[in-house]
Image (cartoon, rainbow, N blue to C red):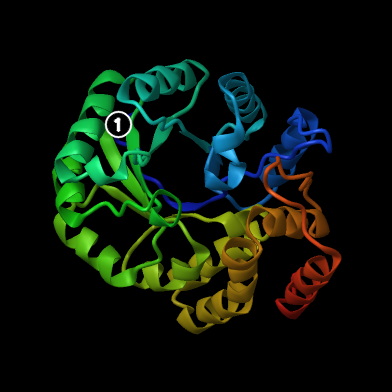
Amino acid sequence: MTNIQIKGVIPPMITPFNENGDVDYQLFAENVEKWNKDNLAGYLVLGSNSETVYLNEEEKLELIKITVETAKKDRLILAGTGMESTKETIKLTNKAAKLGVHAALILTPFYYGGKMNDEALIQYFTDVADNVDIPVLIYNVPKFTHINVSANVVEKLSRHPNIIGMKDSTGDIPQLVKFQSVIPESFNLMVGTASAWYPALTLGVKAGILALANCAPNECAMVQEEFEKGNADKAKEIYARVFPVNQAVTATYGIAGLKYACSLLGYNGGYVRKPLLELKDEEKEKIKQILIKAELM
């Protein structure tokens, strides 16, 4: 399946936890069933918004299994399987492949960030791509990793037959244009934040893995639909309307904010896993007002 062409909106799915910190698999499955009715292209299980760094391997594999079993059959299943070492990344990716995942989103290793130069990153992604049973996507999210993948790295890796794309979560449009100038036509360059969704569409980007799609999937999809129908103004209007929601559920209030917005809009947010903190009442009220203003409630 190395010739996957990704188009549309994909949520990096939230992981609902119980108050005691256990994963609530039932609520997770219910979310997938609800998203099945929404206008989405697929699912990313184990993204940054899934609180993946707080999950053990058993929990990760169970969430993958539920996603594969519950998702609509025509939907693309991506899994975030990047670990700190090459060996563990390959191991987890191949376990995900056995469970039916179509492609793996691989985070840049970051703990020894000072040593993760272009050479190290090219070697890492090449070694992983050479040894896994499904195609690989590069995941660039400097906000969390403090590592920004360079155009040089993207250019080299985009030539690898098993590296089929990249999720760029920087929201940096000039950098996106730079990436576009060095990749082959078939390479899936995706944006990883709804704040860059409309500008990215105008540049010819075809897919977005957007935190906002957890709670406002159809609005995210409509931006693309209207744009592709030639209704740029309509697309821009929807984008501008939901933009403050994205700001709130990513930058300002983070995952707790995203989960609360999901709960208000009919999905199962559940609790965050500690050490993350739940929202305070005044923060909840602010999110509610933002959702009302964006005409989502």
Q: Residue at x 47, y 16 (%)?
A: 95
Residue 140 vs residue 117: left or right? right
Splitting the image into 4 quarters, where does residue 111 fall?
A: top left
Label 1, residues with CA under 10 Å away: few <14, some 14-19, many ≥20: few
The quadrant of the rendering that contains the N terminus is: top left
Of 297 and 126, which appears nearest the observer? 126
Q: Residue at x 79, y 30 (%)?
A: 26
* Secondary structure beneath label 1: loop
Q: Is residue 27 above or below residue 217?
A: above
Residue 101 vs residue 148: left or right? right
What x and y, as percent, mark residue 254? 63, 58
Question: Can you see residue 297?
Answer: no
Q: Residue at x 24, y 67 (%)?
A: 177
Residue 184 vs residue 246: left or right? left
Q: Amino acid at mark 1?
A: Thr
Residue bearing the label numbered 1: 2
